[in-house]
Image: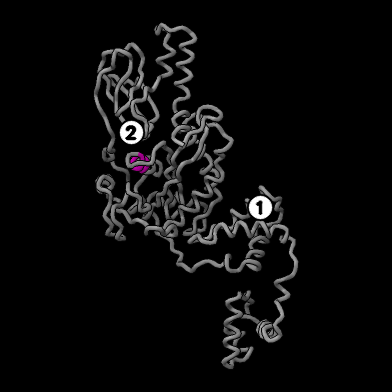
Amino acid sequence: MSQTRLTPADSDFIMKLNEVGYSNSEIARKLGVTEGAIRYRINRQDSGEPDGRTSKPSSLDTFREWISVWIEDYEDSRRRPTLRLLEQMLREHHGYGRSYDALRRYIRKRFPDFHKKGARCRLETPPGKLLFVDWKEDLHVQLGAPEAWASVQALCFVLGFSRKMAVWFSFRKDLESFLAGHQEAFRDYGGLPEAIRPDCLRSAVRVWRGAASTLNERYRKYLEPLGVIVLPARPGAPEDKGKIEKRILDVFSRLDLRHRVYRDLDDLTSRARAILEDAETTWRSGATGFSVARSFTYEKPYLKPLPLHFPALPVKESRTRVRRDGTVFFDGNYYQVPGGYRDRSVFCRHTGQEILIDHEGAEIGRFAALPQAKGMVRLSIPALEDPKLHLSERIRMWGLEVARRQVQIYQEMSR
């Protein structure tokens, strides 16, 4: 007979069966335990004595106060967090040195109501069928220099079969950034899934009705030519995207955003990809039992081929003339370009992440998109460093300082 650990709910069940006349052996067979375990609980109930086996001192009792406080923080949560977070907190702040399994057993004995999870069905999807997407919002990152904090958004993707992940960073969390992130992820994967599962955010879904949900019109028009259908998660049901929720936690716990300084978003993206490439050689796919990297090698041929041309992203663009002060007015702000382009016609594009300014096919300006700024004069380091620009060294240095710190200042004032 396999031994099963009895819970408080099982003890109540034992007492009810005993009251209606079931023998100890019959109850033991129903619960898959020994007859002695049933006899012990019935005798203890009759005597009124507490269960001495669960009240024995434990070396983890020294952490009980911190564990209780942590559990209280999540009492009203719809789903309890993983105990790995508790283990990490105890190790980092309270000197916990035992194993994760020891902590899990202690929680199960001392806090049985918290340890118990709600029942749900675990499913795996066939290769090439489903791609999960979700935002990791408002990451505080040092960009360009120490203490130059910026607020960055991360759009994350995970294939349901292999668990292969892709991450794309932007300064904004809007529809343009949402679609641009999709396009980059499709390129990273080298193919298209049959379906995609987002949250019920307004960039994706207007009215949720399961597979018949009313989608954001621009989102629908972008995915429809690609032959990708949308199966949005239920509102307020993160378990519908459990595979990506866990992966996001795994990746961003390894990405040191508090101490590391990144040159720009490209540098941040490169670091995230390096972490993923290393981790996916050991992370496992639940559908195959092999590593994520090996499982993706198998899944990739099942993805639909990429189109020759992606649908046009909904970006703002305009052709305008460089003003006499060396700036270009576009999308509510002024962008500085080298002085040699005064009075010339330039082409401006808002990609959702950046403002790009071209003259006859050559890029002459690139600026991070700052969504709340209006009437801002965005200074250009190359333009200010031009030796043909007649400025005193003091004034030039002041201008360069503003150019280097404008994004930082914007982020500080936004917060």
Q: Position of residue 259 (x, y in %)?
A: 59, 35
Question: Disc 1 to disc 2, how far (Cα)?
Answer: 44 Å
- Is residue 217 depicted above or below 34 in this figure? above
Give the residue at mark 2: 351
Q: Examine the structure image and report whether residue 200 is included in the region drawn in magenta.
A: no
Q: Position of residue 82 (x, y in %)?
A: 56, 57
Residue 231 vs residue 409, the one in the foreground: 409
Give the SS element for disc 2.
loop
On screen, residue 223 versus residue 373, left or right, reads: left
Occupied quadrant, residue 104: bottom right
Q: Amino acid at mark 1?
A: Leu
What is the chief secondary structure element of the magenta stretch? helix
Which residue is at a point 57% across and 77% down the rendered structure image? 9
- Is residue 42 depicted above or below 8 in this figure? below
Residue 308 vs residue 371, the one in the foreground: 371
Occupied quadrant, residue 36: bottom right
Which residue is at a point 35% across and 22% down the rendered structure image? 335
Q: Which segment did they paint magenta?
A: 177-182
Q: Amino acid at mark 2?
A: Thr
Mark 1 closeness class: few <14, some 14–19, many ≥20 residues within 10 Å: some
Residue 228: image tag: none
Which residue is at a point 39% across and 52% down the rendered structure image? 131
Residue 345 vs residue 406, the one in the foreground: 406
Occupied quadrant, residue 338: top left
Mark 2 closeness class: few <14, some 14–19, many ≥20 residues within 10 Å: some
On screen, residue 125 versus residue 394, left or right, reads: left
Earlier sequence position, callout 1 versus callout 2: 1
Residue 90: image tag: 1
